[in-house]
Each structure stands twice: as structure tokens, then as C-alpha cells.
Image (spheres, rainbow, N blue to C red):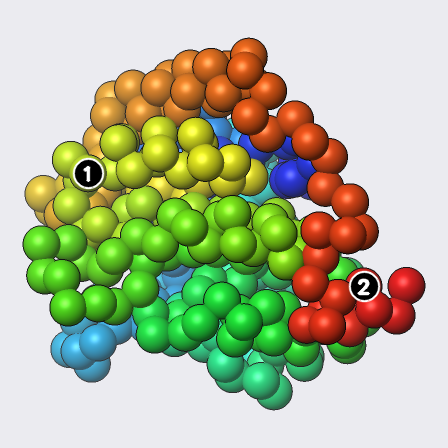
Amino acid sequence: AGAKVGGGHFAMIAGPCSVESRDQILEVARAVKAAGAGMLRGGAFKPRTSPYDFQGLRADGIELLLEAKRETGLPIVTEIMNINHLPLFEEVDVIQVGARSMQNFEMLRELGKLEKPILIKRGLANTIKELLMAAEYVMSSGNTQVMLCERGIRTFETATRNTLDLSAVSVLHEKTHLPVIVDPSHATGVARYVKPMAAAAAACGADGLLIEVHNNPAAALCDGAQSLTPEEFAETAALVRAVRGAVSSVGAHDAPLTEAACDRSACRTCAAS
């Protein structure tokens, strides 16, 4: 849909954790676009810890995302939980593999047969190598349009929902050519920490951000505590642009990624080239 990620192109992906209604998704989509987002995220199928929590609008949620796409022109990013749902994702621009599905190997193989970008989130207890191998499952089936996402890992710390592993950005850039996105919303679980962690991710060379935005976080059906208001997102986006400009001015990330930067022993796609 015209959006570029990596190679100097920074992806600002924003939207609600869950698509809840037509008014909600359209209002948020307009707001994040005005603030500079290049893609719209929104959950239609929701993997929830409790079976009694809101599970998403499912197919209706995807239809609402597509309506928001038609109105704003923003490409849409949404999560798939079951490969049997794939026909519903025909017009989805980027299919997200959630943290809980990172090692659903059969689904990864099927996604590898598509000609569509795949965003793979690192599992909450998975190593960087395991994340790279998840990407390999997709790429070895023919689809090389893969993005990786660091969304925090589980540690003994309880002050935040997860622990954001920003070192993963540098390590992944050293081991692979794939773009690396950071999700500071799920990593922290606390809205007031999202802005500083987004800035930190931009400073350390992330290729994009995945940020949750809700027009009324207090009434959100999912993850309201970590969701920014549209106004807070606009402030965050402005800070990220300033940080990237400052980093660029000192040439911190100017060195082009070469084949030598890939860990060829862990990347069959590179090893075969």
C-alpha cells in the first residue's frame, strides 16, 4: 500500500489494541494519521489470557479496519490467530504474528506462501535466536517480506508489564537484514512510560514503532492502561521525530547494513545468496 519499512524508512504504526466500534476506529485512524502515523494497527482477533475477557469483533473488526483504510489511506496491520482465518485477511496489508503465536510453526509456514508483509512479535520468553528462526520459517517458504518486533520479555521485574529489551534492536541489526520494530506499549504496560521508551527505541536505531492509541483509554475494552490518547500520541510522534533528527545529525546510524552484518549461520536466506 505504498508504505516502506527499513532502509532508512521509519514506520510509525499506531491504533487501538482492539477495534471496538466504527466511531472509535475512524476517530483514532484520523488522529494518528494527522500526527504522522504511516500505518494503522488494530486488533480484530484478540488473544486474551482470560476466556471471559473481550475477544475482539473478529471478522466485523477487520471490516471496520478496511473502512478506516479506505477513508484515511493508511495501510492496516492486524493479528492472525488461526490460519483458517486467512481468507478474512485478503485485504489486510500487514499480517501480525502475535507473541503467543511466534512458534506456531505450521502457521508460519503458511504465511510464508503469501506475497504479503508479515510482522513477527518476539514471544515473552523467547530468545533472539528463536525469533530469527521464526522468521526463517516464513522466509524458507518463499516470503521474504518479514519484520521483527521487540515487545518486551518476561523477567522478575513487576514495575512494568514486561521488560523492554532494547539491546535486541542492536543485536538483531547485527544478525539480520530484517527491519526491527519496537512496541513500547506492551513492553511497559503503562501509558506514561510509552513516550520515553519510544524515544529510546528511536535513539537506538529501531526501524519503527508500534504504539497503542485509544480515543478514551479509561473505557477501553482491552489494554487501556497502556494506551495513549491521540494528543499524547501526537506529542510522542513529535519527540520521536526530534530524536531521530538528532541521532541522524551525528551519524549514529549512517553505516549501511551489509551482508557481513548478517549472522549467516543462522540465516539460510542469506547463506543461500
- On screen, residue 207 versus residue 227, left or right, reads right
Figure quadrant of residue 273 = bottom right
Figure quadrant of residue 184 = top left
Name the outermost residue toward the front.
260
Q: Secondary structure at mark 1?
A: helix
Figure quadrant of residue 264 = bottom right
Name the outermost residue toward the bottom.
106
Q: Which one is in front, 273 or 263?
A: 263
Q: Kindly identify the residue that appears in the image at 75 percent across and 61 percent down.
A: 144
Q: Secondary structure at mark 2?
A: helix
Q: Are marks 1 and 2 in contact (CB under 8 Å)?
A: no
Q: Is residue 163 above or below residue 190?
A: below
Q: Is residue 124 above or below residue 19?
A: below
Q: Is residue 67 above or below residue 174?
A: above
Give me the disc on residue 270.
2
Identity, as a three-letter code, of the amino acid under mark 1: Tyr
Disc 1 packing (10 Å; few <14; some 14–19; many ≥20): some
Image x and y of residue 50, in percent: 17, 78
Q: Kindly identify the residue that appears in the image at 52 percent across and 75 percent down.
A: 130
Q: Kindly identify the residue that appears in the image at 35 percent across and 54 percent down.
A: 165
